[in-house]
Amino acid sequence: MNDNLVERKPNRLIHEKSPYLLQHAYNPVDWFSWGEEAFNKAAQEDKPIFLSIGYSTCHWCHVMERESFENTDVAELLKSKFVAIKVDREERADIDHIYMQVCQTLTGSGGWPLTIIMTPERQPFYAATYLPPHNRGGMMGLIELLNRLSGLWENDREKALQAGQEVSNWVKKTSGARRGISLSKEVFTEAFQHYAQIFDSAYGGFGSAPKFPAPHSLVFLLKYYEQNKDAKALAMVEKTLTAMYQGGIYDHIGFGFARYSTDRKWLVPHFEKMLYDNALLAMAYLEAYRITGRELYSQVASDIFTYVMRDMQSPEGGFYSAEDADSEGEEGKFYVWSLNEVMNALDSHGTSYCEVYDITEQGNFEGRNIPNLIKKSQPLDARTEFKEDRQLLFELREKRIKPLKDDKILTAWNGLMIAALAMGYRIMKDERFLHAAQRAADFILKKLRREDGRLLSRYRDGEALYPAYASDYAYLIWGLMELNEAGADGRYLQMAVELNDDLLNFFWDEQEGGLFFYGEDSEQLLTRPKEVYDGAMPSDNAVATLNFLRLARIAGNSDLEEKARQQFNNYAGTINENPTAYSFWLQAALFHQNTGQRIILS
């Protein structure tokens, strides 16, 4: 942003709570938040809507904000020809889910910042992601695009309206559930074999760069190993968990994992840290420790929790959402080191530390160094040997300008971390983990429920807002059940049952089955989708299905078992076609099978 913010007039976003919207509060763009004021203005002035969606720790969102939304020519063009709306995808996951589908349909890919041009009736007719202010390197510039689309709107309106109608009709179609198709008996083996085909035997993980941790895929393989005793399934998981820890995707100074690796070796991360990634990865390391007894896995899980409890838990108990990749306008600046910095900090230990952690004069990242253990065969030994040196470097790093912390508290992501911490206590018997999980659960149940009991999605700066989505319910119920299994107060199980009833009341599709993304009492958008695919986080329908099975077993509730059966019946055809895209569904199916509950396998 501009250094002279104090001299500039804020726009409407200054009144919002979202850290992402507040990042744009001093743009010259005449931003609106999502709401009737913006849509009424678009209708009254007969203007198309420019919808921009992103999140506070998104690197390319920062780039577009600096390059394009600080550009006065862009601001003038948007004000004269469009109504500009800014949305935080983490607060309004429903809006983001729908318009990301649009972008993927129109362009074949997606990402953030997400750019949508649509009619005042919210029908989209153009989609893109990051856009520089002017044409650059074969990429269309925002100014050129806005001029072209405003010309289309003014001179060939029918073409835009027809495209908007066609796209809207497409996204309104059902998810393609094919009822009556059973889950194949071979689906688990087919998933395992596909993972084996795309496994990187040199560095772990699946596929090529960029490389994502995919923790629920790893947990499926651990469950598959337990059932089938196929040593290769366990070997793939162990290689991946060890390689990720050794790489720069893991913060060897302050702990916790970054979002993903930009390279095959896990060396150079996209430096942002997300609460949900760390929750899901902690669970993967815990499961690996439970099965193998390897101390490395328990130590990594414990380190993740140390990071989260130290840096990401609010004084009231809830967990913050994320930490940015950027600081002082540079990606990764907070996390990287020069050789001289390390040598001066560690004195006589500096040479050996630098040798072990790959700290060199030339650097391994843009002339600087990301500490890593990629070349070391005994990574746990290095961690133990340099424990005091790590603490010295951590204290030195704490004096740097830190990346932005997105301090909003999301019910869904807190549910995942509550589940992870409760698992951590159950497996490792560390009372700190149980205490932190209970504090977070109590915070959510106190601060993110309305008086009528309706769960809410986001809390920040004393304000709880937005009716919770299916994922908020599903993940929180998961966390509460893990607390119960860890031996916590029985009220958590009682609350899980109550919230599960609410989930079915607000989200269950009585005609087609399955859970809608947002509730029947929420704002009704262009369409009401269902999430089935297990992406960076497992789908709400998959998690809810496993919740149904676990609650049915605990309470002897045959109605919930029937709901789970309906879920498998609804989505079996989709899962059979591409099982590795539905790894959490496969976990639920294995649980269903292994607990003696009825599942139809053809």
Image (cartoon, rainbow, N blue to C red):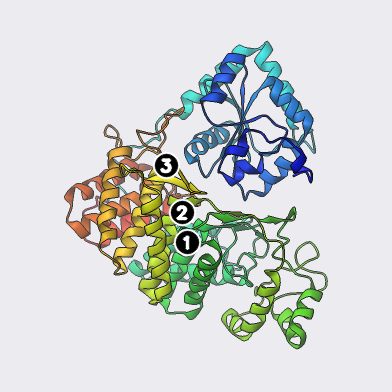
> Of residues 452 and 429, which is closer to you in this image?
452
- Do the numbered discs 1 and 2 sit on residues whose CB atoms are within 8 Å? yes
The residue carrying mark 1 is 279
Q: Residue at x 75, y 37 (%)?
A: 8
Left or right: 526 as drawn, with respect to 184: right
* Mark toward the start of the polypeptide (1 vs 2): 1
* Mark toward the start of the polypeptide (3 vs 1): 1
Neighbours of disc 3 within 10 Å: few (<14), some (14-19), many (20+) = some
In the picture, the disc for residue 531 is 3
- Secondary structure of the residue carrying tag 1 is helix
Q: CA distance from mark 1 to mark 2?
A: 8 Å
- Secondary structure of the residue carrying tag 2 is helix
As drawn, 274 above or below 163: below
Q: Nearer the viewer, mark 2 or mark 3?
A: 2
Q: Nearer the viewer, mark 3 or mark 1?
A: 1
> Of residues 367 and 485, which is closer to you in this image?
485
